Amino acid sequence: DGGITQSPKYLFRKEGQNVTLSCEQNLNHDAMYWYRQDPGQGLRLIYYSQIVNDFQKGDIAEGYSVSREKKESFPLTVTSAQKNPTAFYLCASSSFKGGGNTIYFGEGSWLTVV
Amino acid sequence: GIQVEQSPPDLILQEGANSTLRCNFSDSVNNLQWFHQNPWGQLINLFYIPSGTKQNGRLSATTVATERYSLLYISSSQTTDSGVYFCAVERSTLTFGKGTMLLVSP
């Protein structure tokens, strides 16, 4: 089935460690995104990529890094520089269909700092 | 940046009731989408509706782009409608509102 796969679903990180969240899509979408969601809040954009080997910072990119070496993959690294990383992370992808982008989300990854 | 405000922030309904959720935005947009987030965190795209009216079963949405608002109607609500409803608007990237949390009780 086509879709977006995020892993792991749950992740615990010690203070000072980097962690990488995986996102893979088989929808043949050009654009991919990472969002962060905090309790009771909407989604905030971390990074996005509209084409392989290119990506742009979103609203809250500090303390995060990404890569886009393949069309289907867009991993997110939460670095030790991110001071408050505990959150729900959502990966998404989209394609342009004659009039606009329809965006699809993965199931999310819960990151907790211990 | 563009501001997106959703109302009400919380809503409790009895099963079978109807409801209207509102999304106001501060500037012209290229795109507007409505999403439902279930209790497990999964976000599902409900409508892509930059303007006009669309219907899908018990749900319908209307966007009046010139007045910068959109409405999501839920009729004959069911317990499975519970969750958070997000409006998101796009100029270059999607900006989300804070959502409306809906609880439908049996």
Image (spheres, coloured by chain):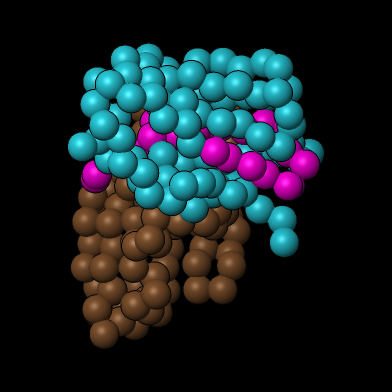
Of A21 and B63, the residue lying toward us: A21
- In this picture, residue B42 sits left or right of residue A67: left
Residue at position x 71%, y 37% in the image = A72
Count of numbered circles in the view = 0
In this rendering, the answer to whether A6 lies above or below A47 is below
Position of residue A27 measured from the top left corner of the image (x, y, whole percent): 74, 47
Magenta segment: A22-44
Residue at position x 26%, y 68% in the image = B103
Position of residue B101 measured from the top left corner of the image (x, y, whole percent): 28, 57
Of B106 and B29, the residue lying toward us: B106
Of B34 and B69, the residue lying toward us: B34
Q: Is residue A32 magenta?
A: yes
Q: Quadrant of residue A61?
A: top left
* Chain A image colour: cyan
In this rendering, the answer to whether B24 lies above or below B44 is above
In this rendering, the answer to whether B70 lies above or below B10 is above
Of B15 and B52, the residue lying toward us: B15
Q: Quadrant of residue A70?
A: top right
In this rendering, the answer to whether B26 lies above or below B54 is above
Quarter of the picture containing the N terminus of chain B is top left
* Chain B image colour: brown
Residue at position x 61%, y 31% in the image = A74
Q: Is residue B25 visible?
A: no
Q: Is residue B8 magenta?
A: no
Q: Is residue B60 visible?
A: yes
Quarter of the picture containing the C terminus of chain B is bottom left
Q: Quadrant of residue A29?
A: top right
Position of residue B67 measured from the top left corner of the image (x, y, whole percent): 45, 35
Position of residue A35 measured from the top left corner of the image (x, y, whole percent): 45, 34
